[in-house]
Amino acid sequence: MAALVEADPGLDPDGLMDGLPSDLWGALVLQVIGQQLSLAAAVAILARLEALHGGRLPTPAELLATDNEMLRGIGLSRAKSVYLYDLAARLEDGRLDLERLRTLDDDAAREELTQVKGVGRFTADGVLMLALRRPDVWPAADLALRRAVERVWEVDPPASVAEVDAVGERFRPWRTLAAVYLYRTRTPQRAR
């Protein structure tokens, strides 16, 4: 990887995540906000949430104290507000411990994260990739990844989860990196 980044710094995987929160709390908030939205829309809503709190991400306690109508006013659905409140409450009362989460293997971390209302495997995988920097996460059910696999490997749409999983197998144990690159593809290119 070092040789690849040295040859082209634009391929640095850390640079691919520029502008996204890399701390666990911020990544969780962004992943919940971003459910079924484009990354650009999610980042815009996150920026409005930060603007409500003096230009920074609110702490879990501050989020809990934020009126639901204010959250709706920045573009959050009622459901996502409920999910964020549940996440913040779990962090505040200790049902979810972010430091402990760092020590868990991928499956155990997913299990812990999916106890939060509204957090499923897709959201948990995003946190594993974005904040925990786990090297071998492949969210095969994610529509954006499925579309990228269709485009790059000429898989007939709609690509099934099994087809996307099969493509991902070639990238073990670095599936996260492959997924991040695929998310960032903009022009059709074919694999050889």
Image (cartoon, rainbow, N blue to C red):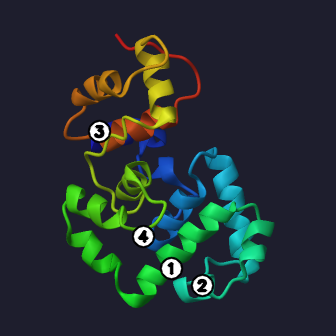
Q: Which residue is mark 4?
A: 24
- Density class for disc 2 (Cα within 10 Å; few <14, some 14-19, many ≥20) is some
- Density class for disc 1 (Cα within 10 Å; few <14, some 14-19, many ≥20) is many
Q: Earlier in the sequence, mark 4 or mark 2?
A: 4
Question: Residue, x 69% and y 60% (percent of image)?
Answer: 77
Mark sitting on residue 164:
none
Q: Which residue is mark 2?
A: 64
Would you say 132 lies left or right of 126 here? left
Residue 84 screen position, x and y as percent:
56, 71
Question: Residue, x 41% and y 45% (percent of image)?
Answer: 12
Gap between marks 4 and 2, in whole Å? 17 Å
Q: Which residue is mark 3?
A: 175
Would you say 143 lies left or right of 121 here? right
Gap between marks 1 and 2, in whole Å? 6 Å
- Observer-nearest of 118 and 176: 118
Q: Nearer the viewer, mark 1 or mark 3?
A: 1
Q: Are marks 4 and 2 in contact (CB under 8 Å)?
A: no
State the image quarter where residue 172 is shown.
top left
